[in-house]
Image (cartoon, rainbow, N blue to C red):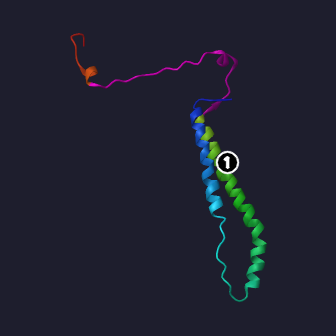
């Protein structure tokens, strides 16, 4: 598999952004003690595994979305046998908009 714009694959480093955000959100919060905390601890224990799984699935979906978006912009294709044997040629256009190019001669 080849890409028409392989330089765009460098944008895959953007995957680090949701990972960093996810790691910053894992910080510990201050504990506040008050009466009847026993009921809150039971609720917290019940929701802890569900919350952890939910956060990991959200992180995975964000990473996959960025990956697929970058790969789509890189335009992947599978070359045919004829295309593999061809020599890649680069074509460059140089546009000169200086004053010397604006001069008018007798020929036009």
- Give residue 103's quadrant in the image: top left
Quarter occupied by the N terminus: top right
What residue is shown at x 65% (from left), y 73% (from top)? 29
Up the image or down, 53 lies above or below 15; here it is below
Up the image or down, 48 lies above or below 65; here it is below
Q: Count the marks: how many?
A: 1
Residue 69 seen in the figure? no
What residue is shown at x 62% (from left), y 47% (from top)? 66
Identify residue for label 1: 64
Quarter occupied by the C terminus: top left
Residue lying furthest top: 107
What residue is shown at x 21% (from left), y 10% (from top)? 106
Magenta highlight on residue 86: yes
Residue lying furthest left: 106
Magenta highlight on residue 66: no
Residue 58 seen in the figure? yes
- Image position, residue 37 (x, y; %): 73, 84
Up the image or down, 56 lies above or below 13; here it is below
Magenta stretch: dominant SS?
Answer: loop
Mark 1, other Cα within 10 Å: few <14 / some 14–19 / many ≥20: few
- Image position, residue 61 (x, y; %): 68, 52
- Give residue 44's quadrant in the image: bottom right
Up the image or down, 3 lies above or below 38; here it is above
Q: Which residues are magenta?
A: 75-98
Query: SS of the residue at dot 1?
Result: helix
- Image position, residue 45 (x, y; %): 78, 74
- Give residue 30's quadrant in the image: bottom right
Residue lying furthest bottom: 35
């Amino acid at each position: 598999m080849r890409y028409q714009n392989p330089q765009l694959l460098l944008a895959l480093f953007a995957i680090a952004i949701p990972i960093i955000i996810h790691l910053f959100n894992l910080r510990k919060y201050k504990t506040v003690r008050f009466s009847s905390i026993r009921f809150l601890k039971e609720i917290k224990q019940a929701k802890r595994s569900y919350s952890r799984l939910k956060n990991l699935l959200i992180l995975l979906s964000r990473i996959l979305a960025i990956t697929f978006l970058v790969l789509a912009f890189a335009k992947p294709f599978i070359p045919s046998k004829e295309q593999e044997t061809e020599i890649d040629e680069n074509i460059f256009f140089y546009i000169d908009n200086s004053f010397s190019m604006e001069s008018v001669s007798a020929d036009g």
